[in-house]
Amino acid sequence: MALINKIREKSGWAIGAIAIGLGVFVVGGDLLGPNSRLLGNDAATVGEIAGEEIDFQRFDLVFQQIKGNYEGQIGRAATESELAMIREQAWNQLIFQIALQKEYDRLGIAVTEEELADMVQGNNIHPSVKQAFTNPQTGEFDRNQVVQYLQNLDQMGPQARPMWVNFEQGVLSDRIQSKYSNLLTKSVYVTTAEAKNQFAAQSTTANLKVLYVPYFSIADSAVKVTDAQLKDYFERHKDLYKVEDGRSVEFVTIPVAASAEDKNYIQEEITTLTEQFKATTNDSAFVNTNSDVPYNNAYLHAGELPEQLRSSLPLEEGKVYGPFTEDETYTLHKVVDVKDGSVNTARASHILIKPENDTPEAKAAALAKAKDVLAQIKGGADFAAMAAQHGTDGTASAGGDLGYFTEGRMVPAFEKAVFGATGAGLLPAPVETEYGYHIIKITAPKTKRTYKIATVQRSIEASETTRDLAYATADELSGTSGSLDEFRANVAKNEALAKEEASNIGKNNILVGNLNNARELVRWAYAKDTSVGDVSPVFEIDDQFVVAALTGKREKGYAKIEDVKEELTAAVRNEVKAQQITEKLKGAKGSLDEIAANYGPDAMVRTAEEVSFASGAIPGLGMEPVAIGKAFGLKPGGRTAPFEGQGGVVMVELVELTKAPEVQDLSGVKAQLVNTRSSRAESNAFEAIKEKAEIKDNRVRFF
C-alpha cells in the first residue's frame, strides 16, 4: 500500500515537474464551472494551441487527472486557490503536449522503449523511480521491488495500472524535456576572446568624476508637451508599450461583519454555553454539537496546551477555563482528564555566552563573563534584560525564553541540568555545552503531567439579518446604477461606501485590487456582453458583497496612446528637459566643478571610484549604463559632452583607469558565461515556441 501511495505521489510529481519546467508559460487560472451566459458560439472551446482547438472535455480530462493525483497526495479536497493552480498545470501540460511536442518531433527528439525500460529497471534509473522504490531499511534503490511491483500490477486494484501508466508517462516526458534542454544548453559556446572581454568588463575599474543635473531641477509645469510629441515618442519606443488583454474597474465593497447586536447575542450564548459545559457529563458530544471545531481526544503536555491555559498551570480536572476572546472567536476549555505521560516536559530561559574561539583562554574568558552575569542576576538584575544584553543566540530578543520542551530535545549537558532540577528558579552555576556557557533559569519545572482538553470555539459571525442588510445595500447600488455615471453618483451619496479602482486586470487573474478570490468579477468584466460603463450584479467575495463598474478595456497588442498618456508625458518631458539642460551646458569651459558652479545650484559633481564596466551603475546616481559605456571609451583626463542619462543630464570625466590583470586561466569566466547564456537560450526558445504557437486562452469563459 505504501508503494502504491509513492507511485501516486510521483504521478503528481510528474505533472508538477512539467508545470514547473514550463514556468515561462504561466499565465493564471481559476474557478471551475462554465457559465453559459458568458459564452459565445464557440462555447465549448477553452483555447487554441498551435492551431489545435482545446475543447472543454479535453481540458477537463487533463484537469481531473492532475486534481485526482493532487488530492490523493494531500488526503483532502483541493481548495479554490489550489484548483486555480491545478488548472494552470493542466493548461501548461497541454502546451507541453502540443506546442513543444511539435518542436520535439521536428527535431527528432524521442524516448525509445528500450530507453524507457532502462530508466525504470535498467542501469540508468530515473530519479523518481529511485525515490519510489527505495528500500526503507537500507535506504538503497531496490530493482527487485520494481520488477515485483510490475509483475503484480493487475492484482493491485483497478487504479494501479492507470496510475503506473501516468507515472511512466511523466518519466518519459521529463526525459524528452531534458534532452531538449540539453540540446539547447550544449549548443552554447564561449570563445576565448569573449571570455577575455568579460573578464576585462568585470575586472577593469575606473575612477570617475561626474557632473549631474537632475531632470527634477526643472519644474514639470515649465515644460509643455504636445500630442505630436507624445505620438512621436510612442512610435520611436513602440516595443516598450506592448500589452496583454486588460480590464479596468471601479468597485465598492460592503463588508458582512457582525453588528453590535450580533456580538451581544453571541456573548449571551457563550455565557449560557459556559454553564452548560460545566454541567455536562458527555464532553465530546457537547463539543461536537456546540463547537466550530470537532472534539480532540488527545492528551497534551504543557508545551502543547493553548497559550490561554499555560498561565493557569497546573490545571484542575473538571474545571472550565474561559471564555477567552481572540481573533473574533470565543473559546472555552474544559479539563476532561489529567494523567502522567511517558516523558517529562519543562520550560526554561537561558543566556548563552559563546567563547570567541576554541582556545583555553577564550573559554576561560567566556566562563568568567558567564559567572559575572550570573552574579548580577543573583544580585537583582532582570534575567530577560540581561539575556537581551548578553545573549548570543536567537533567544536573546525573547529574553532568553526557550519555551516548553520535552526530554531528548536539548543537548545532554543542558538537558541534564534542566531535568535534574527539583524546582523553578535560577541554577547556581553556568552549564557548559559544546555551544558555550549557559546561565539557566527554570521557569516551569519538569513534569509528566498531561491533560485531555475539551474545547468549544465559536466564531463571532454576522447574523442572517445583518447579512441581508448588507446584501440589500449592495443590491440597491447595483439595481439603481444603470451607467458608470449613476454608479459614481450613488456611491458619492452614501458616506458609508468607498470606491476603489483596479486597472488592467488580466483575464486569468484571481486578485482584483485587494479582493481575493475575485474570479467571478473578472469573468464578468471579460464577458462578451459586458461593455464599458456597465455595472455588475452583486458578487459575494469572501465576507463581503461587491458591486463593480467596467471603466476600460484593453486589447492585446500595442497600448493606446491615451491609455499610457501619463507615462508618455513624463518620458517626453524628460527629453525636453534634457535638451534644455544640454543646451545650457554646451560649450562650457573649465573643470567640472567650475562648469557646475557656473550652471547654478542644481548642478552637482560626484566622484565614483573603482567602477566596473559590467556594473552599469554609478554610486550615488544609480543605473547609468550609457554613462559607464562612454566613460570607458575615454582616455584618462578625457571628458564627454553633456548627454541624456536615466535621471538627468550627465558629463563624465575619466580620472583613472586600472586595467584588468593578465590572466592565463579563463575557465571560470567561460563557465560563468556558458551558464548565463544557457539559461537564457532555454528561456528564449520556450518563449519563441509559445509565440509561434499563437496560443489563444479562453479559459476566462469557463473558470
Image: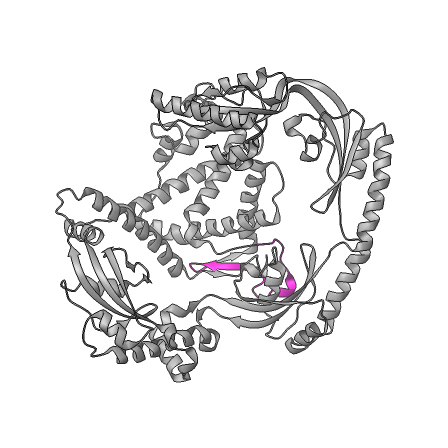
Task: Judge whether 591 appears above or below 332 on screen.
Answer: below
Q: Residue at x 35, y 58 (%)?
A: 688
Image quarter of residue 259: bottom right
Name the residue rendered at 38%, 68% in the picture.
240
* Residue numbers of the magenta segment: 30-52
* Residue 692 pos. (x, y %): 37, 60
Where is residue 424? Give x, y as percent.
Answer: 63, 22
From what the image shows, is residue 384 above or below residue 496? above
**Front in this rendered view, residue 163 or 35:** 35
Q: Is 79 inside the magenta-drawn segment?
A: no
Is residue 1 in sight in this rendering? no
Residue 644 seen by the camera: yes
Q: Is residue 218 above or below residue 44?
A: below
Tell me the quarter of the image containing the N terminus: top right
- How far across and down, in percent of the image, does residue 80 sit? 61, 49
Instruction: Specify the principal SS of the magenta part.
Output: loop
The C terminus: image quadrant: bottom right
Q: Nearer the viewer, residue 595 or 642?
A: 595
Q: Is residue 253 above or below residue 659?
A: below
Colouring rule applied to residues? one colour
Q: Quadrant of residue 384?
A: top right
